[in-house]
Image (spheres, rainbow, N blue to C red):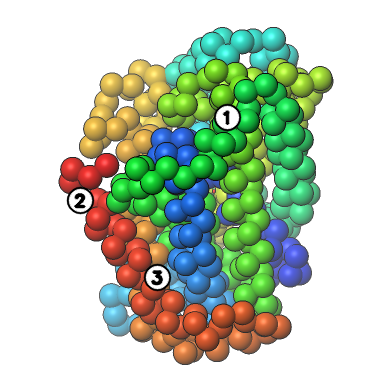
Amino acid sequence: MSAEKRDHWQSRLGFILATAGAAIGLGNIWRFPIVATQNGGGTFVVVYILLVLLVGVPAVMAEVALGRHCQRNCLGVFRMLTPCSKWPLVGALGVATSFLILSYYSVIAGWATGYVFLAASGRLASLGSESLARTFQALAAEPATAISFHLAFMAMTVAVVILGVARGLERWNRILMPGLFLILLVLLVRVWTLPGAAAGVAWFLRPDWSHLGPGTVLKALGQLFFSLSLGMGALITYGSYRGRNSDIPSTSGWVVAADTMVALLAGLTIVPALFAFGLPMEAGPSLTFVAIPAVFNALPAGGLFGTIFFVMLVIAALTSSISMLEVVVAALAEERRMPRRAAAVLAGTAAFLLGIPSALSQGPWNDMRLAGMPLLAAADFLASNILLPLGGLLTAVYVGWVWGARSAADEILQGADRFPLGRLWPAAIRYLVPAAIAVVMVTGLLPGRG
Ligand code: PHE
């Protein structure tokens, strides 16, 4: 397909919103508060923000530039620049990682879909925190329910991807992102005015360096890659739908800023809510699904707002899941010449099947362990803390050393109004980003470290 004929975003705002839409999802609202509460709160937040600035921003620009330069999917870029080499394997790793994340992401998004119905039917209203915890258990542990919602969510993902980039992906994000932001703000204000919430805000913001260890930094890095959709080809693919004269530095900055803001907003809402309602911090997967309904129950017209919130969460998850499926579909369509529709149905069905063990892991397969973790947590650990950093590391090395930091920087400059700290970028992508990822992975994965 020639670059001219390639489906493109209709506008700069369309790209920002679509990419922010891919970035903002369950990773911000569901995963960030969990990982933060399990890893020391304030300390984790500080490490996270530092890593966003040092690793996240340069890496996002590198992936978008690579995709825009080649106008190809995440496998095609490596084939185009370095045919007859092993580098396309990095693209294949990205496709595999997207596929794995999609499989369990859809399970969690399926719970959120179930919560739309629970909230709308008023069944959450007036439940105390213990009953809310039991309600979550009943939904996630019941195989038929969990698998049906997983299926429903995957079907929606496939449907949007079939519609294509501009019509499918772009349209949704325009409405959703601002709405999600607003409703999170409303929730935040409500929580902060509850008695007891202040202690949660303080806990979330106060660093306690005794929590700082290689394990914490690895989890922060994993969260960063997951949240920014780095290291698995999504940003390469989305960058490839951009025209040569689009502005990479400022749009990347906006995407990273929006993503980080939403994660912090979610953490600053959910953690104080735990304190105010006396909910356990180590709730794991159920955390968001118990804390958020508890807040809504303390609001007037909470049922209505709760329904709106979960609809938005589902759409936020959808704009992320379509980007994962899009990675796989673009690769199949362009590299294997498979029709788009067939590729979407095939990959969606396979990801649905692969997700079933994750769905069962909250219920009947509760006791099964992989590397000491329940299946869903194990899949998430493998993807976020190993595969994504590995993909990010290899991509940074590729952009910095193989494609070349100079050529990449030229690509970034093309169409850019400004490239703040642009002189530092080549050094960042060649040395800082790969070294940081390598050190964090090696120390964090060494046995016996927390
Ligand atoms: N970034 C998305 C989120 O925070 C998840 C995601 C990961 C999307 C990887 C695409 C690729 O929910």
Residue 312: quarter of image: top right
Q: Is residue 18 left or right of residue 72?
A: right
For image coordinates 58% across by 70% down, the residue present is 239
Crowding at dot 3, Cα within 10 Å, few <14 / some 14-19 / many 20+, comes out as many
Please give the residue where the numbered disc 3 appears in the rendered image: 433
| Left or right: 355 as drawn, with respect to 113 | left
Q: Are marks 1 and 2 in contact (CB under 8 Å)?
A: no
- Badge nearest the viewer, 1 or 2: 1
In front of the other: 363 or 344: 363
> Mark 2 — residue?
446
Identify the element where label 3 is drawn: helix
For mark 2, give the secondary structure. Answer: loop
The amino acid beneath tag 2 is Leu
Q: Residue 65: image x %, image y %? A: 54, 77
Judged left or right of residue 225, residue 321 is: right
Distance between the Cα atoms at labels 1 and 3? 36 Å
SS of the residue under disc 1: helix
Q: Nearer the viewer, residue 337 or 351?
A: 351
Residue identified by numbered label 1: 199
